[in-house]
Image (spheres, rainbow, N blue to C red):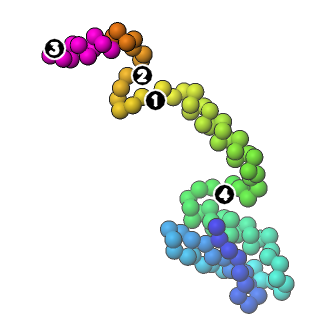
């Protein structure tokens, strides 16, 4: 996430790429301390270009409920399609106690 700040009358942007700060003038000059919307758009475009991803129009307006709902839907789908977990390569099929006893007996004889 970047910041906007003024140097004299001109608004400047500062954002980070791979941990290094990048600074650039927006070229927008104002007399008041209110950040112009053009400067905000300029910063969003620069942040999008820096990360290599497109800037989403609603990225700053996503609500917690939407994120939570999406995450729950994602995990539910993954669990529904996933195979049952087993321990260290063991088969996930059920065996009866007589089959287990026979397996133990056969291993002892070998």
- The magenta segment is 100-110
Give the residue displayed 77% in from the left and 71% down from the top: 38
Q: Earlier in the sequence, mark 1 or mark 4?
A: 4
Q: CA distance from mark 1 to mark 4?
A: 38 Å
Judging by the rendered image, the residue that carries numbered circle 2 is 92
Q: Earlier in the sequence, mark 4 or mark 2?
A: 4
Q: Main secondary structure of the magenta part?
A: helix
The secondary element bearing badge 1 is classed as loop
**Nearest to viewer (mark 4 / mark 2):** 2
- In percent of width and height, residue 104 lies at 26, 16
The label on residue 109 is: 3
Judging by the rendered image, the residue that carries numbered circle 1 is 85
**Nearest to viewer (mark 4 / mark 3):** 3
Q: Earlier in the sequence, mark 1 or mark 3?
A: 1
The secondary element bearing badge 2 is classed as loop
Q: Earlier in the sequence, mark 4 or mark 3?
A: 4
């Amino acid at each position: 996430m970047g910041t906007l700040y003024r140097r004299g009358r001109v608004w400047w942007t500062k954002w980070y790429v791979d941990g290094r700060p990048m600074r650039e003038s927006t070229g927008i000059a104002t007399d008041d301390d209110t950040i112009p919307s053009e400067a905000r758009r300029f910063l969003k475009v620069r942040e999008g270009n820096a990360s290599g991803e497109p800037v989403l129009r609603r990225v700053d307006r996503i609500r917690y409920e939407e994120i939570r709902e999406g995450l729950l839907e994602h995990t539910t789908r993954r669990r529904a399609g996933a195979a049952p977990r087993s321990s260290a390569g063991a088969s996930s099929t059920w065996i009866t106690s007589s089959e287990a006893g026979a397996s133990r007996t056969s291993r002892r004889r070998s």
